[in-house]
């Protein structure tokens, strides 16, 4: 008799499970729809625009780098179940792009580069030798895929997101107004970058990996060299030689590390060459505004650091000056 009851209960469970609508699987811990964004800083740009009950989460956890990120089976399930997936573009981390292509129907994907008309070419993560002064043009060839670090592009992104969310039934009723308020704050950040970096026009920086070329090109500073030209690969002796040469050539006063990568090697380089160490964070915070303001403070501090020859960042001439 007991056996029959267990069989009947099992059959009943299967029938009930089969009656659950397919759409209910695209829900978060609170039972509502989930919007996945590729990197953590995008969370604070999307979350204010969604309707109540819609969760916004990042594919790559805060504090991790998307470069070389290995997606787990649970990540794949989240992709499959998401109501919408916001990706930066195909080059930032190709393995994530491939997983999205396999798991997510195209109408559930919002591609930032595509929406903004930005072409991101292959080659960003390949190493290229230094040919002359314009290192920021050859540190990776290909266009920089770190689109969320450019306030001008983020402003445009916020102009496109409300309608994209609304078309999928995920936008707050006042998403357009919320986006405009957020865009005003983004423009303030852009204005602060322009004003505070203007005294350092033509000055050079050395970064941990090649994430800041858009900021450099936007606001008139130069990427003299990158310690880790290929984000997922340890620097080679040749890379370190190029860093030392760039310090001497450009009168760089500081090295910028990033929390996503081990900092022992950059700190040893800085110690040997008499450079300051500051931190730039391209992706570990879900607070875009706070992250960008902290990065600006770090840039100003590093650019103000005395070069090994003694001149301050504000006073030293550009290496291209006559």
Image (cartoon, rainbow, N blue to C red):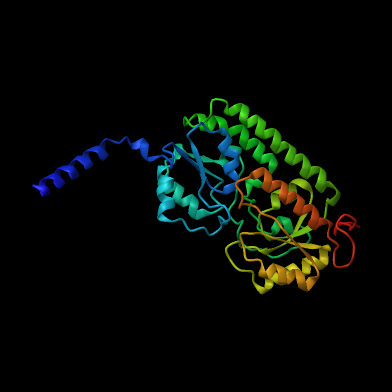
Q: Position of residue 97 (x, y in %)?
A: 49, 50
Residue at the far top in the pictured view: 173
Q: Residue at x 19, y 40 (%)?
A: 12
Q: Is residue 175 above or below residue 249?
A: above
Q: Position of residue 154 (x, y in %)?
A: 65, 40
Left or right, residue 282 beside residue 101: right
Left or right, residue 235 beside residue 18: right
Q: Position of residue 116 (x, y in %)?
A: 61, 38
Q: Quadrant of the C terminus?
A: bottom right
Residue at the far front in the pictured view: 2
Choose top left, top right, bottom left or bottom right for residue 66.
Answer: bottom right
Q: Residue at x 18, y 43 (%)?
A: 9
Q: Position of residue 294 (x, y in %)?
A: 72, 50
Choose top left, top right, bottom left or bottom right for residue 222.
Answer: bottom right
In this view of the protein, which residue sits in the foreground, 111 or 75?
75
Report how many numbered discs are placed on residues in the image. 0
Q: Residue at x 69, y 59 (%)?
A: 139
Q: Is residue 227 above or below residue 169?
A: below
Residue 84 visible in the current orientation: no
Left or right, residue 179 beside residue 184: left
Q: Is residue 272 above or below residue 140?
A: below
């Amino acid at each position: 008799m007991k056996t029959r009851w267990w069989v009947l209960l099992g059959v009943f469970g299967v029938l009930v499970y089969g009656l659950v609508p397919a759409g209910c699987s695209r829900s978060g811990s609170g039972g509502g729809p989930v919007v996945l964004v590729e990197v953590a800083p995008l969370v604070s740009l999307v979350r204010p625009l969604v309707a109540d009950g819609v969760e916004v989460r990042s594919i790559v956890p805060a504090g991790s780098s998307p470069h070389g990120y290995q997606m787990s089976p649970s990540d794949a399930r989240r992709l499959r179940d998401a109501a919408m997936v916001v990706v930066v573009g195909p080059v930032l981390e190709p393995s994530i792009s491939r997983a999205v292509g396999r798991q997510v129907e195209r109408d559930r994907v919002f591609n930032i580069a595509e929406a903004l008309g930005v072409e991101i070419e292959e080659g960003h993560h390949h190493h290229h030798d230094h040919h002359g002064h314009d290192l920021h043009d050859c540190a990776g060839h290909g266009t920089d895929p770190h689109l969320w670090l450019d306030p001008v592009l983020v402003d445009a992104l916020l102009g496109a997101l409300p309608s994209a969310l609304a078309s999928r039934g995920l936008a707050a009723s006042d998403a357009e107004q919320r986006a405009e308020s957020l865009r005003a704050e983004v423009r303030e950040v852009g204005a602060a970058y322009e004003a505070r970096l203007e005294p350092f026009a033509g000055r050079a920086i050395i970064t941990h990996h090649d994430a800041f070329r858009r900021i450099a090109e936007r606001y008139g500073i130069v990427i003299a060299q990158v310690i880790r030209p290929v984000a997922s690969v340890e620097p080679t002796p040749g890379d370190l030689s190029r860093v030392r040469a760039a310090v001497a050539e450009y009168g760089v006063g500081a090295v910028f590390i990033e929390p996503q990568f081990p900092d022992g090697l950059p700190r040893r380089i800085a110690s040997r060459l008499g450079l300051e160490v500051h931190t730039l964070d391209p992706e570990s915070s879900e607070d875009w505004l706070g992250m960008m303001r902290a990065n600006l403070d770090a840039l100003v501090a590093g650019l103000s650091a005395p070069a090994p020859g003694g001149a301050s960042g504000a006073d030293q001439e550009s290496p291209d000056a006559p």
